[in-house]
Amino acid sequence: MSEDTPSLVQCLTNFSVCSPCSNSAYEPPAYAAPVANDYSYMHEKLSYRDEEEAESNYQASRVQGDPYKTADVDSPALSSYPPLQPSRDMITQPSTRSESMVYHNFNTARDHAGDPRIETPTTATGHPATVGHFSNGVEPHGMDLSQYKTMHPSRSPETGIFGNTEQTRELDIVLSSQRPPAAKRGPFRSNDERERTAETRKIGSCIRCRMQRIRCEIDPDDKHGTCLTCQRVSSVKIWRLPCLRYKITDVRLFKPGPVKGYEWTRRWTEGVPGDISLWESPDTKFVRVTEGYTKHNILLRVRRFVPQDGDSLSRTWVANGLKREVRIPAYAIVNLDEAKNAYDDYIKSGYYECCKSILKSKAKLLHATYLMAIKASQDPQTPDKERELLTKALRLWMAIRLTTKSTVIVGSETLGMDRDIMDNTSPLHGQIPLPPVMGAQIELVLIHQIQSALRRELLENLQAMTQANKHKTWFTTYLVTFILLHNVALLCQHDAGYARKHGMKTRFAREDMVQEYQTGANILLAYFHYCTKGVFPFSMDCKDQDLSTLAELDESKTKVVLATRKVVKEHRNQWAKIRQSADYENDLFYISQLYEEHWSPLPTI
């Protein structure tokens, strides 16, 4: 024991601790990764060390006591294994700050561009980021963006100093306040909490809680009433939107199909389009059809088919209380995919002309607002997402109009029908009507193949833009909401007209659907009024400063808002009477509610 003591003392005496690493975290020795290209400016600017000094420093670091030192790659024990090569650039290291860790192939700033939570970007060292900051945290002295472009005109800041355009890792900028993806929810603390969460998911969160991304606590005494979260702020002496459990994606924008009992065929009751397989004649004909909204028409390939049970072979209407009927030849569209493509092209090229045709006898407010929407949808200065949203809204609006007006045959091919086939009591007198099954096919294509897809994309994009609630998109959401609210009024007009045409004893042909249209209008209005943040932009009392806090408006958009204020002031009393009389078919019944200062949803039929 005494013999070992001097050795132990000597060992402890000679023991030394390596110098502390930079910051507080240990960093393994830097890996000398091969550099693909040798850029002269790096050697010129990074003059604080040359290659020989770097090599000597690297070797010195290997000699010092490294508790994590592994076997030398040149060791005979590893002679059978080739040295591993880096799978990615090891010069650039991700930040070690937990709130801004950046990983390989993980986009950061691009995925969250425009997020109001994102503040001034900084480098990993905490300094404000500029284009001149490099991924290794060292900025070449005296180099700015203009000098960089002069020295390397073929590269852009997005390309990176290594000219790699295949994968952008964006490790050169770390956003100081960027939040990582939301963590997964942990286990419920109690079974009661689990049940409350399941109940909320079942009936949905209210708009306020959804927009603020907070827990919507259901009132156990009134599950469908005001949530407990909203009750806690109800005493605040400012106007607040009622607690409404709405989702924009639940809005109904078009009829689902024909009125029950007035179907033209029972071939496609499930709404799945399919071509007819049993034909009476091998001969095909080409007919041109139109609804009259544009100067153009649609070319369709048709053929005589063998009727089956449920196929209607006549057109009917009611005049002076008497039902009228005329027999129509049994023709149908040969290929529904061809028909869909033809209608797609027709809608894309014709929505502007369709708007002009329908709005020519409408109020000036409608003219001006639709014109602004069309201009914005075609303006290259409009951000892509906003332009796409407006375009989808206008195309869907036209596609719906095509199913709310009778389509007729035009041109020389009339399928053997004379122009006086419908007498003077018919709304189609002097025109060639569509064969019923052919009309059912067109509705099938428009509703289930065109309208459904546009509606889903439109409402998902509108909900995302609305919930983002950004100043720069407020005007676009206003225009889209305006168009969709007017669409509800036009649907009510169509349903009321269809009921009169067929002698129904109800105000609307599809009263259950009209109720859903109206609920959809309330959903759109609720979200719009929530996003105004208590500012009433169309009120004469709204100050310029308040308007600027609500939306980013250029000169043309500001003119539209100011002109709309004057119209609202002039017609406020008239619009109030329209709402009080439940004139749902009026073009301005729903639109006028955009301009109410303390809006609350009106009851449906």
Image (spheres, rainbow, N blue to C red):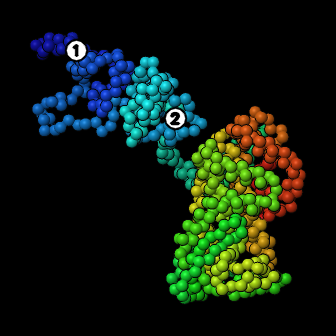
588 or 326, which lies in front? 326
Residue depicted at 84% across the width and 45% down the height: 566
Q: Looking at the picture, does residue 553 appear above or below residue 359?
A: above
282 or 177, which lies in front? 282
Residue that badge 1 annotates? 15
Please state the horizontal and vertical placement of residue 381, each as a whole percent of the image: 62, 42
Q: Looking at the picture, does residue 87 appear above or below residue 497?
A: above
Asked if residue 543 shows in the view, the reply is: yes
Residue that badge 2 annotates? 178
Horizontal placement of 287 versus 124: left or right? right
Please state the horizontal and vertical placement of residue 500, each as a whole percent of the image: 80, 75
Give the residue type at disc 1: Phe
Q: Nearer the viewer, mark 1 or mark 2?
A: 2
Q: Looking at the picture, does residue 184 appear above or below residue 276?
A: above
Please state the horizontal and vertical placement of residue 169, each as a whole percent of the image: 41, 37
Residue depicted at 62% across the width and 56% down the height: 392
Instruction: State which tag comes first along the sequence, 1 or 2.
Output: 1
Q: Quadrant of residue 215?
A: top right
Give the residue type at disc 2: Gln
| Other residues around mark 1 within 10 Å, as few (<14) / some (14–19) / many (≥20) | few
SS assignment at label 2: loop
Please state the horizontal and vertical placement of residue 345, each as a whole percent of the image: 59, 63
Residue depicted at 31% across the width and 28% down the height: 38
Marks 1/2: CA distance? Answer: 45 Å
> Where does the N terminus fall, quadrant-wise?
top left
Residue depicted at 14% across the width and 11% down the height: 6
